[in-house]
Amino acid sequence: MNRKAIQELTVAEIVANDYRTAEVFKKHGIDFCCGGKKTIERVCRDKAVNIDLLQREIEAIQSTEDISEHAFNEWSLSFLIDYILNVHHAYVKRNMSLITEFAQKVALVHGDHNPENRDIAKLWDSIVSDLTQHMQKEELMLFPYIKKLDQYSLGELKQFPKAVFGTAKNPIRMMENEHDLAGNLMKHIEIISNNFTPPAHACNTYRVLYAKLQEFQNDLHAHIHLENNILFPKAIQLEDVSLSLVNNCEV
Ligand SMILES: [Fe+2]
Ligand SMILES: [Fe+2]
């Protein structure tokens, strides 16, 4: 949907289409319930809200997949891992080089007048290098082990899987620390980019860079949520239960 079309929609229509946008209106103090019949154009004028910023925030939410329909908690751990790999790891790999190219270009062209873009390019480089190594550890060590645990618990694997890292708790603690680091680097970019808001004079590359960074942060939050809050606690629980069964059998 183009920008003009969004401006002509009412607040209620946008929220009805995608309830996740409600949080954007809430943040700007816009009534999306009883007073939702006003168009975006009108409500921004009445409330003195920057319409470009509001639209970018709405578009960032609309461009990410609505994951609330998925019953992640009911999925097998192997299926959840495949989802994380195919959706989130693939997203990171697909977008890293494009964002790097844009971040370097914007830092070079606009760095004198908007020096925060040089810091953004450096922070982004750290994110790329950290996340590349982080995902490799998950893909080569932790996830295959969790998949084997899952297969063992279903009787598809006869031997309890051996791990080079002791128990899953060790790499999981490391992965959670690395999630915090990546989340903090993105938060730093969010702050110095003024909540991913390019200045009025920004060229298209500048605008696309900020929009992609915001999209990347949204994806990272969903990715980390699935690992920290669903996959990892379930893997630890499954390992504990399976180990106690193994130990009981050996007694
Ligand atoms: Fe991951
Ligand atoms: Fe991770």
Image (tube, helix red, strand yellow):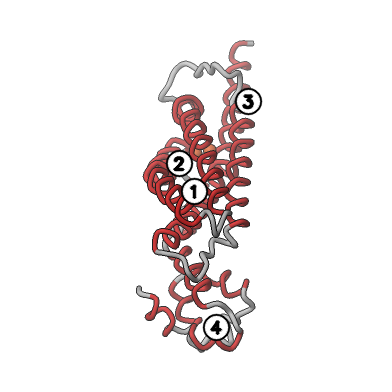
Judge whether 138 appears above or below 218 on screen. above
Amino acid tagged 2: Leu
Mark 3 vs 4, N-terminal side: 4
- The residue positioned 59% from the left and 56% from the top of the image is 190
Q: Which mark is residue 72?
A: 1
- The residue positioned 58% from the left and 62% from the top of the image is 195
Mark 4 vs 1, N-terminal side: 4
Mark 4 vs 2, N-terminal side: 4
**SS at mark 1 in the image:** helix
* Residue 251 percent coordinates (x, y): 64, 11
Q: Which mark is residue 44?
A: 4
Amino acid tagged 3: Asn
Q: Pointer 2 and pointer 3: residues touching (CB < 8 Å)?
A: no
In the displayed structure image, the side of residue 193 where residue 101 appears, left or right: left
Amino acid tagged 4: Cys
- The residue positioned 57% from the left and 82% from the top of the image is 33
Q: Nearer the viewer, residue 5 or 149?
A: 5
* Residue 188 percent coordinates (x, y): 62, 51
